[in-house]
Amino acid sequence: MSEENKRGTPDLQEMKVYLPVEGSKEEELSLQLISKIPDYDDNFTIKDIIQKILQDNKQHDLSKIISAYEFAEKAHRGQKRSSGQDYIIHPLTVAYILLEYSMDTDTICAALLHDVVEDTPATLEDLKKHFGQDVAILVDGVTKMSKVPTNTKEQQSAENIRKILIAMYQDIRVIIIKLADRLHNMRTLKYRPRNKQVTTALETMNIYVSIAHRLGIRSMKEELEDLAFHYLDPFGYEEIEKMLDKRKDERQKIVETIKNRIAERFSTVQFEEPPIIDGRVKSVYSLYKKIIVKGKQMDEIYDKYAVRVIVSTVPECYNVLGIIHDMFTPMDNRFKDYISKPKENKYQSLHTTVTGKEGIPFEVQIRTSKMHQIAEYGIAAHWKYKDGVITKNSEDSRLAWIREILESQQTADDVEEIVRVIKSELSPEDIVVMTPKGRSIQLPAKSNCIDFAYKIHTEIGHKTIGAKVDGRIVPLEYELQTGQICEITVTKDPERGPNRAWLNTVKTSEARSKIRAWFKKECREDNITEGKKELEKAFRRSRINLTENQYSEFLQDDFRRHNCENIDDFYASIGYGGINLTNIIPRLKDKYDRLYGSPSENLPEITASRPYDRSQGSIILDDITAIEKSPAHCCNPLPGDDIIGFITRGHGLKIHTKKCTNYLSALKRANPEELARWREVSWTDGTRSSEQSRISVLASDRVGLAFDITAAISEARMPIINSSARRIKNGNALFECTVSITSREQLQRLIEKIKKIKGVISVERT
């Protein structure tokens, strides 16, 4: 897409990025490091495209491709990119990248034309008339939705990604064009302003790298990763490059020595065709994740050297594995067989890590030539073996994740959910867990037993009441690890359904979508009641003081945004988890302040500083005279929590934790008047003052449950201010109480103690 029109701002806090202050010396150094990104040979012409087609000896309709070029060149004539190049260079480069993946005629034409509808007066009807419906559909799939009423930039970005996913589910070529488009924009990103570089790099890392990984396009994924990393943390990038450059010649010599030894041994073995032996060093970003993020030393990374052996048949793969293990010493727990158990993106290979006589560990990857094409080019590798388009039916298993993401977004009633799902669920870090019968289930990292149950079957998920991992009973929220065997226990009660609390504990969109769908279908009245209660609670926390009669008018825009016809639909959607209040309350608070008065009115006077007298409390107030203080009910801070004070109108100083959603939302809004009311405070040294904290315990209902919980609190010598217990749906009970606490550590010990009580599902500080 046009690099001039990027949208979407992924959360900076989710990436470990170095973002120097604008205008600082660090910013200047950062820009100098970014400028070191090498120039790519992007001055392609239509002659280069034709020459590439002729060299590859592929069946392409040259006249159609030349016509598409002429149409695009005329449409973009006079337009320039930020680099100063004629704009037509961009679609030509995208087309050339796709030729390297052996894409078909219509895909190349769509690449040449992919920006004409968005950036020129040309229409889809024009493209359909001149180049056919397939080309028009592909261009439409990668064309951004430029105007969606009332949407924020984040929603606009999410809508565009949703549109691309829908289009790619119908024709996978859409996303391959989009990935090539993003790759060229990343190669030329240094010509954009610094803020655009960071925004685009984050979106690339969070969305497009994840999609390229899931489609198995390793070559594109790694280049996108390295380029994005270069802009997000130029200092970290340079540090890794220095490590690599320091012993570059030595490493190259090591790889060549290993390759020669293997080739010499292979000369005594008969193969159908001579094996191809190749060597490599890990990409910059993959090394960064292990060195910087995981805190490893370069010498602790066993797979920084890798040798790849490509043979003709699967039996030869296992034969080569035996030869390698005979030549070198295999390392314990470092063998993976992705041939018998392929990854979800269809990647197949044997991986083993061994050491030679020099004591240097290195990885050996063994695969067939077809496996290698799929490893490098993923789903695009099909064009190297057959003509035409991959039909949806033939690739249903590979594209199932797209359907799951789209279904999750539909049940969420929140278009921004689609971005969150892609970022969390398409991560390259996956786990493989086994059923007791030996079936392997692939899940995102940190998935729990509930995710596992829903991955097996929807009804198993709904009826889950317990789980065993490697023969040991574990809580349902237990995080699974690769190689474990998980056994799910289900109830025979036909009335039993999922637990509403699972919406906050599951990792996968598939599980969350199925839980929402169950509550949406089975429990509308309960959803309305629960949703109304949650909304009123959120409004109280955010000081949105409206009567119930004012709700409908105040929420009219959100009714449209979330496809709700009335207030009951809105309550119900909150109740079954379709609307996440955390995402919408900051915007509603801004709207409330605009409609019902300035947040800066009636502030207490702030004068010269003196610390708060310890005899009067346990908090030091920086730069504020002693005024009335009290804990905020939205987060209930405890001694030991990182805290911040908020100057209220007529209620003194409210103390919040620095993790409080109200405080974090204020930072995002960055309203100067509002930020001025947040003031630094801290606990006094050694304070032992008591504060009240509320805890909520969800458990399977049984006789004696409340007694056991109360006894645990009493044994911890914590006064109970008040408590209540009630039976809820699905045979569970909810026990809530307020206790007097002197520290966060004391509360954590209590929570761990209650978790050990029989039947307890979850314990939360509320």
Image: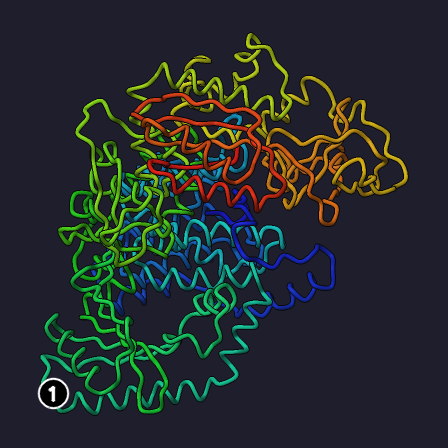
State the SS at label 1.
loop
Please indicate whether residue 591 sits to the left or right of residue 312 in the image. Answer: right
Is any part of residue 67 visible from this angle?
A: no
Please indicate whether residue 31 sits to the left or right of residue 381 in the image. Answer: right
Labels in figure, total: 1
Q: Quadrant of residue 383?
A: bottom left
Q: Quadrant of residue 415?
A: top left
Q: Quadrant of residue 52?
A: bottom left
Closer to the camera in the image, 176 or 636: 636
Above or below, 139 relative to 724? below
Label 1 neighbour load within 10 Å: few <14, some 14-19, many 20+ = few
Closer to the camera in the image, 53 or 210: 210
Please indicate whether residue 53 sits to the left or right of residue 423 in the image. Answer: left
Above or below, 122 relative to 378? above
Above or below, 193 relative to 465? below
| Residue under the point 41% across and 26% down | 734
Quickly name the residue at label 1: 269
- Across and down, in percent, residue 83 comes to 57, 59
- Across and down, in percent, residue 483 comes to 25, 59
| Residue under the point 16% across and 57% down | 386
Above or below, 353 relative to 42? below
| Residue under the point 82% across and 39% down | 612
- Across and down, in percent, residue 694 comes to 54, 31
- Across and down, in percent, residue 602 comes to 81, 22
The three-letter amino acid code for the residue at tag 1 is Val
Is any part of residue 189 visible from this angle?
A: yes
